[in-house]
Amino acid sequence: MTAVDAAVRLDTPAPTPELIDVVAGHRRRRSLWARIPRPVRRMVSPVLILAVWAIGSSTELLNPDLFPSPAHVAGTAWRLLNDGQLAVHVGASATRVITGSVLGILIGVLLAVLAGLTRTGEDLLDWTMQILKAVPNFALTPLLIIWMGIGEGPKIVLITMGVAIAIYINTYSGIRGVDQQLVEMAQTLEARRSTLITQVILPGAMPNFLIGLRLGLSSAWLSLIFAEMINTTEGIGYLMSRAQTNLQFDVSLLVIVIYAIAGLLSYSLVLVLERLLLSWRNGFDGFEGRA
């Protein structure tokens, strides 16, 4: 520090404790929006959508015959629930999604580990998975029916493929994106290969795996739409198809709401896993609103 800097510092009056407290208190003061619990804040957008929907229906800005009101759709849901139809269709779809997702996760992780850890695995697997990624699921539907019939097999395979590809692409990228310096440091410490994989590489790829899981679960519900077009009499996809044939717009909107809720639950599951598995990561969490 130069003499000039020292003189400036001596001539500049130090802030009083009162001033420090006032400034700190102002910085800590949060806006009214920031004081609302985050779960409540997250519900604002869905509630606004329902409100606009209800207002549009009540004022007849939306044709009630083509766009039934939320109350009408809720009444349809209650009727189908009492009849037992809704539970049957939702249960059948959930079973398919869970089965296909579990198989897809296992297959996707296994292939990603094989391709990511070894060059031989990469040479044998990566191009094939990239090709499958470019092929739409619905394009395989006729072939799967010919090869496997019209039972549950084609439906599970479509969902499994959608999930496995998303898991593979992101997990493989995560494995190959691990910092090489961390690997070299572990090798310098003479860590075993198994320790290197379980303590360095796989934890480093975990964020990408969770991204793949988020995309994979979304793909599972999208694949379900095509899967349940394969000669089925149970499932929310069948419920949607039947509603479109019979011009039951209330049932069609109900199915859309069910898909939305299922997607939200899948997203929430991934968020919980991120908090459990990535508790060590101190990432940016966004700015907090202040007054």
Image: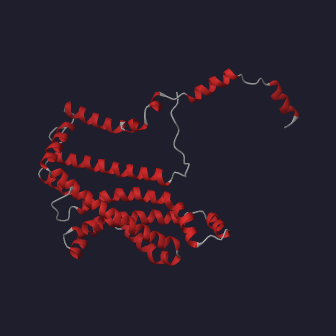
Q: Is residue 205 left or right of residue 252?
A: right
Residue at the far right in the pictured view: 3
Q: Is residue 211 left or right of residue 68?
A: right
Q: Is residue 263 in sight in this rendering?
A: yes
Q: Is residue 58 left or right of residue 127?
A: left
**Rendered view: 115 above or below 78:** below
The total of numbered circles placed on residues is 0
Residue that appears at 32% across and 59% down: 220
Residue that appears at 19% across and 40% down: 74
- Asked whether 56 or 170 is in front, the reply is 170
Residue 221 is drawn in which quadrant?
A: bottom left
Expressed as whole percent of the image width and height from the top left, the position of residue 176 reads: 54, 66
**Rendered view: 77 above or below 214:** above
**Rendered view: 48 above or below 244:** above
What kind of colouring is applied to the model shown?
secondary structure
Expressed as whole percent of the image width and height from the top left, the position of residue 219 reads: 34, 59
Residue 18 is drawn in which quadrant?
A: top right
Expressed as whole percent of the image width and height from the top left, the position of residue 75 reads: 16, 40
Quadrant of the snapshot with the N terminus: top right
